[in-house]
Image (cartoon, rainbow, N blue to C red):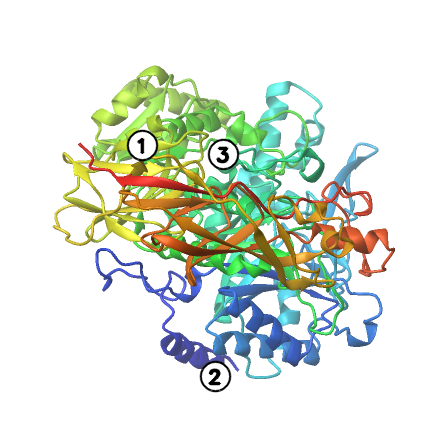
Amino acid sequence: MRKPILLFIAIFLIFTGLCNPVFGSENEKSDIGPLDWPEPQIENRPGTYWWWMGSAVDEKNITWNLETMHKAGMGGATIVPIYGVKGYEDRYIQHLSPKWVEMLQHAVKEAQRLDMWVDMTTGTGWPFGGPMISESNCDLTVFLNDGTLATKFSGRNVKRAAPGGEGMAINPYSSSAMATYLRHFDEAFAKQNLVLPRAMYHDSFEFKGNWRVEFPEEFKRRRGYDLLSHVPALFGDGNPETVARIKSDYRETLSDLHLEYMQTWVKWAERWGCTTRNQAHGAPANLLDLYAASGIPETETFGATPFKIPGIRRDSTNIRSDFPQPLINSMASSAAHVAGKNLIAAETCTWVRNHFHSTLSQIKPEIDQLFLNGINHIFFHGTAYSPADAPWPGWLFYASLEYNPRNAIWHDAPFLNDYITRCQSILQSGKPDNQVALYWPIYDLWHAVDGMQQQLTVHHPEWLTESACGKTAADFKKNGIAFDFISDRQLIAGMAKSYPAIVVPSTKYIPLATIEKLLAIADTRQIVIFLDSLLADVPGYFKAKQCRAELKKLYFERKPTVVESKNLHKYLAAADVIIEPMKMAGLDFIRRKHEEGYHYFIANMSAEAVDGWITLGVQLKNAVILNPLSAETGIASQRGANEIYLQLLPGETRVIRTFTNQQVDGKPWPSLSKSTDTSIEITGNWQVDFLEGGPKIPAPFKTNELKSWTELGDTKAQRFAGTARYAIDFDMPATKNDDWIIDLGEVRESARVILNGKNVAALWSIPYRAPLRGHLKLGKNRLEIEVTNLSANRIRDLDIRGVDWKIFRDINFVDHNYQKFDASKWPLTPSGLLGPVRLIPMKKVKPL
C-alpha cells in the first residue's frame, strides 16, 4: 500500500506548488518586485483547531465548514476528535472505524480542492491513548511500598476523548508502547489508498506518570550505574548533593526516553508521508531537543497579555490571572532556528478572554507578540465543527475563543486573516538572523532536590524566567540582541556554527562533553563567552569526582573567555554581533535575511507613539516600508547608511525590507504629521440601519448622539449581535492640507469605512484610524461606517431566557476560570460606534 500513497503525495506536492520547509525550500529566489508583497502561499494563511465533536461529521457539512474557512482567508485546520453533543448520538462515528477514515479522507481531499491543508491529532482528545492501551504500556507512576519500588497506573485517561478513543493514556517514556499504539492507525489507514493529512499533531504534555517497567535497565545502560542501589536518594532521602545528582540522572533518563518516544512517532508519520507538529512544553524533558525532533515545533498562548497599548481593554471579569510568557514561546522558535526548520506554529489565543468577549483588536497584539518571538504559523484556538442545521450558537468547544462563522467577529475576521497572511509571507521566507546562541543549562533544573519529574509548562514559567539563563535572555530582548536558546545535544552536534557568538550564562552544572565542544568551537575563532565565572560543576552521580577533575583541568589549561555581565553588550558589539538601537526607541522587532538584504517585522507594543529617525543594526542602500494591515508599500526616507524615518502609533506594525547593495526606485512612503488646522468632528443626524445578525434585526433609528445601541431601550438591540451601518452627510470646506485621517474614536468592535461609495478602510484594531488618501472631496460627502459588535449580548439573552444551548458532553461549557458558565448576570456589552468621529488634517513630512 505504501507505493500508491507516496506516489500520490509526490504528485500532489507538484500539483499544488507547496513550497515550505516541509515540502521544499520556500522563496529562496524571489520573483517579487522590491515594493511587492510575496504571492501568498498555502501555509502563509492562518490555520485553526477543528474539533470534531463526537466525530459526528458528514461529507456535506465537512465541505461547508472548510468552504466557510476558505472564504474567510483561512489556510487549514487541525482535526481533533473530542466528546460529543447531546441529542446527536445517532451521528457519532467511532474513531478509526472505516466510516471515520472515510470522513477523514473527504476532509483531506476537500481541503486540497480548496487549496488548503488538513492536519490531525494522532488520537482523540489528549494525551495519546485509548482502548488499545493496556496495563503493560500505560502511563505509570513509581512509588515506595515498604521501602521497595512499586508502580501503578497514574490515573491519566484520555481527556475529552471522542467515541472509540476512550481509555488509558499511553506510557510517554516507551517507544515500544508508541509503536504498539501506532499499529492501530496503520491498520485503519492500510485498508484503502488514502490521501493523508499534511501533518500529525501531538498536544502538550499532560501525562501524570514518571516511570516505565524497563526504567531500571534503561537507566543503567544510559547513566552507567544501578538506580536500584540508590532508591532512598531517588525519593529524597540522604545527603542533599547525592540526592540532587541521582535525581538529575533520573530526570535526564526520563528526557531521553520521552525524546525516543517522540522520535518513534515522527518516523512513523514520515513513513506515511506526513510531517509532524509537537507541543513539547509541559514535558519533563529538554524542550529544545523535543521541539526540534518534530517537523513543525509548536508553542501556545494561554490567557491575555497585559499590554501597555492604550485602548486594549482588560476587564478583570473576563480574563484569567495567568498570561503568555514570550520567552517560553521563544523556546520553540529557537529549536526550529537551530535545527534549520522553517515553520514554527502556535496554538493561539486560548482563553484570551472569556467566551464571546474576545475582540479582533485584542487578538492582534497577541499574534504580533508571537511573530516577534519567531512564530510564523498561527493556529487559532479554535473552530468547532458544527453542522449548518445546528441552532445558534452552534456546536462549541469548552474553551475560548470562538473563531467560527456564527460568532459576530467572523464578519471582519477576513481582515485579521489577511493581516496574518501578509506577515507570515515575510516571516516564512528567507532565513532567521538571530546572532547569539544562548546555552540553556537544563542540568541546573534537573539538580533540584525536591520532587520527581519536572514538567516545564507554559502555565508556570518560573523554570525559565527566574533562572540565570532566563534573565540573560530577558536582558538580550530588552537591549536588541537577537538570540536563540541552544541545548547541550544541539551544541555537541555542531548546530551553533551559524551564530557569531555563543553565550554561556551563569551556570551551576554543565556536562564535560559540552565544555569540550565549546572549547573546540572557540578554537575555530567563533566567539564563546562564559558569563561572570567558571564555577560550573559536572552534573550527575556516576564518576562525578573524575569528571570534575577533568573539567577543572580544562578550565585551567584552556582559559575560556569569561566576561562580566556589565560588559557583555560591549563585548558582543566588538565581536560584530548586531545590536538593534530601535529597542531604545521603544520598538520591538524580529529580523530575517533575504537574498538582497534583510526583513524586519517591527511593532510598537508601547504606550507612546514613535515618530522620527530609527537606526537599524544593518547597513543598507535602500529600504522599503510595507504595512501589513493595509498592504500599502513605499520607499522609506533614508539618512546615512542605516537610518530610516518611521512613524508608528501604539499597536501598529510595519515590515521593513532593506537592500544592502541594490538601488530601489518607486513611490515614496507617505509620511504625514498633523497640520496646524483644527480637526473636524463629524456631527449631525446619523442614520443607523441594522444589516445582518441576530436573533432578530432591530428597527433602524436616527441619532445626533453616538452611543451604544444597547442604550436605545430596544430589547432587540440589547440582544443583537451583528452589523449596523451608520451613515451621515457632511460638508467639507476648502483647505490646503495634503491628506486627512479619519479617527473613529471608540468602536465596539470593528468597522468598515465607506466614503462617497468607496471602501477606504477596515478598522478592526488599535488605533481605529486611517488616512483617506484623497477620497475626501470638497463640499458634500457621504460617510458610511459599518460596525460589528460582539456576540456577548446575544449569549446573555439566551441564558436570561433559559435556552438550553449548552448541550455538550464531558466538561460541557465553562467560563475562563473553569466554573459553570452563566451569562445571565453579565452586564450589557457596549456595542456600535461610540465615537467621536473626527477628521484630522495632515501635511506631508519632509524628514531632515
User: Which residue appears at 61% of the width and 71% of the height?
Assistant: 65
Q: Amino acid at mark 2?
A: Pro
Q: Is residue 488 above or below residue 538?
A: below
- Label for residue 290? none
Q: Position of residue 515 (x, y in %)?
A: 37, 30
Return the disc, 1 or 3, that comes first in the chain's sequence. 3
Q: Is residue 755 above or below residue 733?
A: below
Q: Amino acid at mark 1?
A: Thr
Mark 1 against mark 3, which lies toward the viewer?
1
Q: CA separation, marks 2 and 3?
A: 54 Å
Q: Position of residue 735 (x, y in %)?
A: 30, 43
> Does the rendering let one see residue 65?
yes
Q: Is residue 408 above or below residue 188?
A: above
Q: Which residue is mark 3?
A: 309
Disc 3, SS:
loop
- Label for residue 676? 1
Mark 1 against mark 2, which lies toward the viewer?
1
Q: Is residue 482 above or below residue 71?
A: above
Q: Viewed as shown, does residue 830 lie left or right of 39?
A: right
Q: Position of residue 686 (x, y in %)?
A: 57, 52
User: Which residue appears at 67% of the width and 67% of the height?
Assistant: 385
Q: Which residue is mark 2?
A: 4
